[in-house]
C-alpha cells in the first residue's frame, strides 16, 4: 500500500459547511414545512449578464469552425484578455502593471492555494484570524505546520487577530514572518484595509524581506473612493506583493471560472545561496507545468467584462448585492447589534448578541427565524462570538429575512 501525505491528517476535517448542512437537514426533517432562508453561502445568485453570454457564445462558435478553432492557448492567458486586465484594472488607477506580470487562471481558490508551492517549506507564514480557510489548509497540506491545538490553531503558523477591538486591522507580527496573507475587502469580516493600513504592511514586508499575498477577490465591492483596490496602489508594493483577483463575485463567474494573479517582475525571493530569484519566473514555471490555460470561450467571456456594456452590467450586479448588504446591515444595526462590513464588501459580520457562541447563535437563528448564516468560529478562533451573513441572495428572500429579524428581535 502507498504511504499517504501525513500532513492531510492534521487538517480539521472540512467541518464548517458540512456541519451547517447537517444541522439544517436535521431541522428540516423535524420541520418539513419550514421555509428556511439561506444567507450563509458566499456564492452569487444572479445569472451571467447579456454581454458576457454573447461573448461566450461567440467563443463557442469560433471553436466550431476550421478557420477559428483554438487548441491549447498560452498557459498565462490570451494576450487580448491580459491587455484588457492591465488597462482596466491597473492603468486606469495609475498602476503600472504589464501583461507579463498577469497570469490568468480558473480561480483564486486555486491560485491562493497553489502560490505557497513557490516558497520554502521553512517559510514562516502569517494569517489573519479569522481567515479564508484555503490559506491555512494549503500550508497544512504542504507540511509547513504542526498539529492544530484545541482552539484549532496550527503550530508554526502565526495568527494575527482581526477583531472589533483593533478595528479589524491586525497588528504587525511580533516575530519575524516570511509570508503574510491579507484579504481586503475581507472574507469573512467584510471590512477593508485603508491606504495607511496597507502602507504599514508594505513597509513591514520591505523591511523584513517578507512577501504579502494580497487577495482582492472582492475588490469590485468597494464603494468608498478613498480605499485602494489594489495593493500596487501603495508605493513599494511591487517589490513585496503578489495580488489575486477573481471574476467570481465581480461578474458572477463562480460557475464559469476565471481569475488572475499578478506577480510583478521586480518581485524577488531568495535562494539557498543567498541570490535573488524572480518570483515571476518561478510562478510562470509552476503555472506552465501544472496548468494548461482557461478555455478560449471563457476568456472571451471574461474580456467582455471590460467592454463598455459589460462594465455597466457588472456594476448593476455588484450594486444589487450591495443593496442587499445595506438592507441587512441597516436592519441589524436598528436591532442594536454590533455590525461590521457590508459597506465595501458583500459580507455582513456582527457580534452575536450577548456574545453567545457562534454555533449557539446559529441554532438560535435556525430555530427562531429559520435563517441560516455562517458561525464566525468556522473561520478561526477569533471568529468566535461573531456571525457572517452574505448579501448574495434573492431580494425577496432578503426582505423576508429582515422582516423575520424585526418581528422576532425588534423592540
Ligand atoms: N478568495 C476569497 C477571499 C474568497 O472568499 C473566495 C471565494 O469565496 C476565493 C478567493 C475563491 O474565488 P474563486 O471562485 O475565484 O476560486
Image (spheres, rainbow, N blue to C red):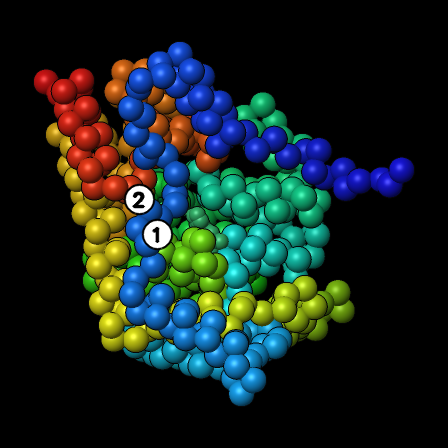
Instruction: Tell me the number on the disc at residue 185.
Output: 1
Residue 180 located left or right of residue 9: left
User: Which numbered disc flags the more N-terminal residue, 1 or 2?
Assistant: 1
On screen, 18 above or below 42?
Answer: above
Residue drawn at the location 41% of the way across and 75% of the way down: 58
Residue at mark 1: C-beta within 8 A of ligand 1? no
Q: Residue furthest right?
A: 1
Residue 88: horizontal and vertical position, in percent? 33, 75
Residue 224: horizontal and vertical position, in percent? 21, 57
Residue 151: horizontal and vertical position, in percent? 54, 26
Instruction: Tell me the number on the disc at residue 392.
Output: 2
- Is disc 2 placed on a helix, strand or loop? loop
Looking at the picture, tell me which residue is in the foreground, 191 or 27. 27
On screen, 44 above or below 227?
Answer: above
Residue drawn at the location 41% of the way across and 57% of the way down: 253
Q: Residues within 10 Å of mark 2 (few under 14, many from 20)?
A: many
Residue drawn at the location 22% of the way across and 30% of the way down: 401
Amino acid at each position: 500500500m502507498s504511504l499517504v501525505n501525513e500532513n492531510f491528517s492534521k487538517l480539521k476535517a472540512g467541518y464548517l459547511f458540512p456541519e451547517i448542512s447537517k444541522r439544517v437537514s436535521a431541522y428540516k426533517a423535524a420541520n418539513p414545512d419550514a421555509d428556511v432562508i439561506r444567507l450563509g453561502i458566499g456564492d452569487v445568485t444572479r445569472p451571467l449578464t447579456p454581454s458576457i453570454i454573447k461573448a461566450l457564445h461567440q467563443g463557442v462558435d469560433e471553436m466550431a469552425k476550421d478557420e477559428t478553432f483554438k487548441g491549447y492557448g498560452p498557459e498565462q492567458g490570451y494576450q487580448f484578455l491580459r491587455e484588457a486586465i492591465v488597462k482596466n484594472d491597473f492603468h486606469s488607477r495609475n498602476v503600472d502593471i504589464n501583461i507579463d506580470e498577469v497570469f490568468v487562471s480558473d480561480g483564486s481558490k486555486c491560485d491562493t492555494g497553489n502560490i505557497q508551492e513557490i516558497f520554502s517549506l521553512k517559510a514562516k507564514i502569517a494569517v489573519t484570524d479569522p481567515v479564508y480557510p484555503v490559506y491555512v489548509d494549503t500550508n497544512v497540506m504542504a507540511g509547513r505546520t504542526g498539529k492544530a491545538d484545541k482552539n484549532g490553531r496550527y503550530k508554526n503558523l502565526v495568527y494575527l487577530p482581526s477583531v472589533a477591538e483593533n478595528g479589524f486591522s491586525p497588528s504587525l507580527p511580533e516575530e519575524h514572518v516570511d509570508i503574510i496573507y491579507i484579504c481586503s475587502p475581507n472574507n469573512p469580516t467584510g471590512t477593508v484595509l485603508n491606504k495607511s493600513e496597507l502602507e504599514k504592511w508594505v513597509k513591514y514586508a520591505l523591511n523584513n524581506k517578507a512577501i504579502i499575498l494580497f487577495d482582492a477577490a472582492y475588490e469590485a465591492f468597494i464603494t468608498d473612493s478613498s480605499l485602494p483596490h489594489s495593493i500596487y496602489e501603495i508605493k513599494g508594493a511591487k517589490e513585496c506583493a503578489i495580488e489575486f483577483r477573481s471574476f467570481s463575485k465581480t461578474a458572477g463567474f463562480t460557475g464559469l471560472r476565471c481569475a488572475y494573479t499578478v506577480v510583478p517582475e521586480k518581485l524577488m525571493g531568495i535562494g539557498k545561496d543567498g541570490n535573488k530569484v524572480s518570483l515571476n519566473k518561478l510562478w510562470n514555471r509552476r503555472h506552465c507545468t501544472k496548468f494548461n490555460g482557461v478555455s478560449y470561450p471563457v476568456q472571451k467571456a471574461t474580456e467582455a467584462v471590460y467592454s463598455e456594456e459589460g462594465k455597466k452590467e457588472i456594476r448593476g450586479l455588484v450594486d444589487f448585492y450591495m443593496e442587499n448588504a445595506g438592507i441587512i446591515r441597516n436592519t441589524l444595526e436598528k436591532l442594536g447589534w454590533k455590525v461590521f462590513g457590508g459597506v465595501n464588501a458583500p459580507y455582513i459580520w456582527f457580534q452575536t448578541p450577548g456574545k453567545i457562541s457562534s454555533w449557539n447563535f446559529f441554532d438560535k437563528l435556525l430555530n427562531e427565524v429559520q435563517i441560516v448564516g455562517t458561525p464566525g468560529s468556522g473561520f478561526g478562533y477569533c471568529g468566535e462570538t461573531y456571525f457572517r451573513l452574505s448579501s448574495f441572495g434573492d431580494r425577496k428572500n432578503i426582505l423576508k429575512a429582515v422582516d423575520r429579524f424585526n418581528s422576532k428581535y425588534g423592540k
